[in-house]
Image (spheres, rainbow, N blue to C red):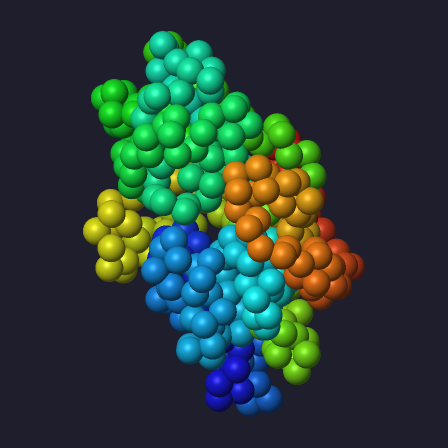
Amino acid sequence: MRDGKLRIAPTCYHTLHIVPIMAAHEMNFLYDEGLKTADGSLAYEILRDPMVPFGLEKLGISQGMKERSVDIALDVQSRTIFFQRARGADVYIIAGWRNQVPGVIIGPPHIKSLQDVKGQRVGISDYNSIRHWAQQIQLRKAGLDLERDVEWVRIGPSRQRHLDALLGGKVECAPISSADAEDLKKQGFNILATPKDQYPDGRPERIIAATGRILEERPDLVKSFLKALIRSYWFCRDMPKNFEYLCQLHRRLLNGSADPEERERATWRAPRDLEVMPFPIDGKATGFEQMLADEEKIGGLDYNVPSIKDVCAQDLVEEAFKELRARKELEPEYKRVKAIAERWGY
């Protein structure tokens, strides 16, 4: 904390990763859930710049939080916190952010399976991104050597770049949304993997992390943050009710990005694009056992891995969800979002 305010910051520069927190701010969820001072001013501060350069969070997140006096880090890869805790960092997983693998991995007509990707080019948004991570796991499960059997091609973060790379023959495999996959299937493309179906208990792709110090000294503020975050997760998936607002919010964030590739991103095309966002409606991160097993398969656990109970501190998010569910005025919204979550399976 600094100046008595809870400090919240994104790990990653991607603007999507601050949409939930900015919605929570603009809809007054943070304020209404208790992040205010005795005189009625804000008791939180949202930093807009990422704490570490993309792809370097595994080594730098705890130092980035320390240097900026950040209490809560958004959109951290779960494996990052296990690595950091193994080195004694004072940082813990307190909630989920992206808790499933939506979309599919697809290839052109002559690629029938992931085994056929051997010797081919694989498109990724960026090195060490969650899509890169997911593809490494799927290719390893298919028996491919990640260093010798495929050529990794960075094609950037935008949806259109992924489609252009596939249609133009720049890559023979890439991750795309389920909606785009339906269009490509009509042109003879083949779905090579549907990762979501492999994780019935969820997959903690990205999580929310907090310092042990703030958890010990001000758990009340952390719980207020978590209640607001859960409400924002509901808000973001409550479609089509909030679609236009969220599109405009995302456009404003994209326009303010300093990165030219980020500014060229398109926002969501239809309510379905937001319905499938894997924000957990109870706020929890789940599926750590399978995540760690997958990480071991790709050689990512070359250290003494701490136990899940020594890395996770999700008691406050459980309390936050329970308190929100007890509020009758929120019941209609929760029912709408619960139906959406049940339809998509997460």
Q: Does 222 sit above or below residue 272?
A: below
Figure check: 22 above or below 199: below
Residue 184 percent location from the top left of the image: 37, 18
Please name the residue shown 52% across and 34% down the image. Answer: 137
In this rendering, position of residue 151 left or right of residue 131: left
Q: Residue at x 24, y 55 (%)?
A: 259
**Looking at the image, is 191 positioned above or below residue 131?**
above
Q: Position of residue 152 (x, y in %)?
A: 33, 34
Q: Which quadrant of the view contains residue 59? A: bottom left
Residue 241 shown left or right of residue 325 in the figure: left
User: From where the camera sits, is residue 97 visible?
Assistant: no
Residue at position x 59%, y 70% from top?
Answer: 88
Q: Quadrant of the C terminus?
A: top right
- Coordinates of residue 18 in the picture (x, y in percent): 43, 58
Q: Position of residue 105 (x, y in %)?
A: 45, 26
Q: Residue at x 38, y 53 (%)?
A: 55
Nearest the eye: 4 or 51 = 51
Say which of 132 and 231 sits in front: 132
Against 233, residue 225 (above or below) is: below
Q: Quadrant of residue 107?
A: top left
Residue 201 visible here = yes
Please indicate whether residue 80 sits to the left or right of residue 13 in the image.
right
- How many numbered discs sit on the rendered protein? 0
